[in-house]
Structure formats: C-alpha cells, structure tokens
Image (tube, rainbow, N blue to C red):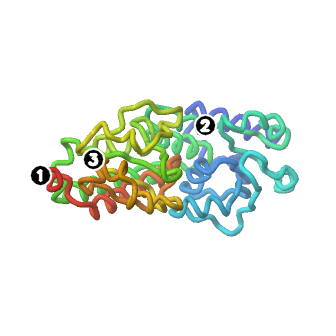
C-alpha cells in the first residue's frame, strides 16, 4: 500500500477517534506536516511535533509568544494565500487546514492528504474543544502520552490560576462569580467584547468568574460594540487586552462618556498582557495567569463599590 494511502487511512482513523493502541508504533504516521492555521499550529507544537512549514511564522511568533517555533519551520506566507511552490517543494505527507480554507482544499489535496480541523472554535465550549482536538491530533501523530500530559498540564495551570485568584482579598469568594467584561479595543470608540461562548468566556467560568457581557455575540463568541454598551453591570471590572490602539489612552482621559461608565468611575479597569483569543490549550493556560495578574493589579472592586 502506498504511503499516501496509509496516511489517509490513519488520518481517517484518528479523526474518528478509533485508532488502535498499536498505532503509536506505526512508521506511517505523518512526519512532514504543513499547518496553515495558527491555532492548529499551536496544538501541533504543543505535542512536540515540528511542522516542516507554517503560514506566516513571523505573525505567529508575535502573537503566540508562549509557543516557540523552531527555526527549521519554513514560512509559507499568508494563511489563506500560501506559497504553493514552497508547499510542493517541502513534499508534505499531511496538510492541516480549517473550514475557512475550504476554497483551496482541492488544490492542497493534489499535493498531500489534507485534514480539516479547528471546528471546535465555533463551539459553545472552545477550551473543552481544544482539549479534545489535542487528543485527536495526538492519536494521529502517535503521541497520546504527550497529548494527555499537555491537557493535564493546561488543566493544572488553570486550577493554579483559580487558586491564585481566590487568594486575592478582592476575589476570596470568586466562586460567587465576580463579574468581568473581557475586551480588546479596536479604536478609541469601539472594542471587541468576548461572550460566554468564546475561549476567554469559557475560561472566565473555569476561574470562577462571571462574564458581565450578556448581549449577542457572533460565531467566534465575540461582538464588536461601542464602549458605551458596557453599562449593563455596574459592578463589573473591565479587562482590556494590551496594547491599546493609538488615541485610546487619550480618550480614557478626556471623554466624559467614558469617564461616566461605571467601571471607569469606580476605577475598576485594568490592562492584560496580550493573549490570542483563538488559541489552543497553551494559550488557555497563559490567559488564565495573565488575567489573574491583571486583576491582582486592579483596585478592589468591593472597596470601590463601598465608596
């Protein structure tokens, strides 16, 4: 049987979660992997699998700082317009894509077996889905032990972050659900707010916090809004991902509308180190600790409420 056929069969088995225990010992597992999505690249790298090529490696390194990329990985250019000549030259035996890559799937299939993954990001529980996707990939690459260890490590990191949060005087009773608006500014007037079905939203619940946003969100679990829409929960703390866009800091100091918002009036707002909102389990662990770091630097919401 040709190697391409063997890999296609193994791929089908892994995605159906039916690979036999002996699959880890097989020599036909994919070894020359190309990944055209950053979140999938994070999951693959988390398992210790080094792709031969990835889409936009400089951008990945800037955004996924917790996930190092070896210098051997070839940059294939734009995520949705990759360099097909380079892909052919690398002679991959597996290409990983997402549903958003559907228009180019046929062309990629002519090069190597191509798997569509990443659907979990549109699910109501993207962190849980990322854990499951990690194990699907672990079976595919014959690295189930590494997959189980990676998932366990992420869960342990999130549990440790929750314990750190509960140790803060302001959040000692975090289980009661202190409320947080989790946001990222687009410009000085608009921001992206993350709902309960986003990666950040699921992790807020994992940490014992309540998502203050109760409005509609899109397929990615977030919504683009004006900041004046964040007035439904007067007790909430506003967390925004750094860095702020140009002019936003000036707006915070000069806008009367901003200064009248409950979180601004009470001083319940804080910046958080940048974490990609659509990452995998390593991103989830990084987010949990970055959020606790940010909340630790924020004024006590209970004290502010008493004033």
Tell me the residue that label 1 is attached to.
306
Q: Return the residue found at the far left.
A: 306
Tell me the residue that label 2 is attached to.
14
Q: Within 10 angstroms of label 1, few (less than 14), some, or many (20 or more) residues?
A: few
| SS label for mark 2 | helix
Above or below for 274 versus 235: below
Residue at the image position 41 percent from the left and 38 percent from the top: 195
Estimate the spatial distance between the alpha carbons at disc 2 and disc 3, rounded to whole Å: 50 Å
Contact check, label 1 and label 3, Cβ < 8 Å: no
Q: Position of residue 48 (x, y in %)?
A: 57, 58
Residue at the image position 16 percent from the left and 48 percent from the top: 173
Residue at the image position 16 percent from the left and 52 percent from the top: 302
Tell me which numbered mark, 1 or 3, is placed earlier along the sequence: 3
Q: Nearer the viewer, residue 76 or 304?
A: 304
Tell me the residue that label 3 is attached to.
262
On the rendered image, what quadrant is the C terminus found in?
A: bottom left
Above or below for 139 versus 53: above
Q: Within 10 angstroms of label 3, few (less than 14), some, or many (20 or more) residues?
A: many
Comparing labels 1 and 2, the label whose residue is closer to the camera: 1
């Amino acid at each position: 049987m040709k190697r391409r056929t063997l890999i296609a069969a193994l791929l089908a088995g892994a995605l159906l979660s039916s690979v036999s225990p002996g699959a880890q010992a097989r020599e036909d597992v994919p070894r020359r992997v190309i990944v055209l999505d950053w979140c999938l690249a994070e999951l693959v790298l988390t398992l210790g699998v080094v792709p031969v090529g990835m889409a936009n490696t400089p951008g990945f390194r800037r955004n996924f700082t917790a996930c190092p990329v070896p210098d051997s990985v070839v940059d294939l250019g734009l995520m949705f317009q990759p360099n097909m000549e380079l892909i052919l030259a690398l002679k991959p035996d597996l290409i990983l894509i997402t549903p958003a890559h559907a228009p180019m799937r046929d062309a990629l299939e002519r090069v190597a077996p191509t798997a569509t993954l990443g659907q979990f990001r549109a699910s109501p529980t993207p962190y849980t889905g990322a854990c499951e996707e990690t194990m699907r990939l672990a079976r595919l690459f014959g690295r189930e032990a590494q997959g189980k260890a990676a998932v366990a490590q992420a869960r342990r990191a999130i549990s440790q972050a929750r314990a750190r949060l509960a140790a803060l005087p302001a959040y000692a009773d975090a289980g009661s659900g202190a409320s947080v608006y989790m946001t990222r500014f687009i410009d000085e007037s608009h921001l992206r707010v993350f709902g309960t079905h986003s990666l950040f939203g699921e992790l807020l619940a994992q940490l014992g916090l309540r998502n203050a946003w109760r409005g509609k969100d899109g397929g990615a679990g977030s919504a683009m809004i004006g900041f004046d829409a964040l007035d439904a929960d007067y007790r909430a703390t506003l967390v925004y991902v750094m860095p702020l866009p140009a002019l936003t800091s000036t707006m915070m100091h000069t806008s009367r509308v901003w200064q009248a918002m409950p979180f601004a009036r009470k001083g319940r707002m804080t910046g958080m180190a940048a974490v990609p909102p659509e990452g995998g389990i390593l991103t989830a662990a990084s987010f949990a600790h970055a959020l606790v770091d940010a909340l630790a630097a924020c004024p006590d919401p209970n004290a502010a409420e008493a004033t």
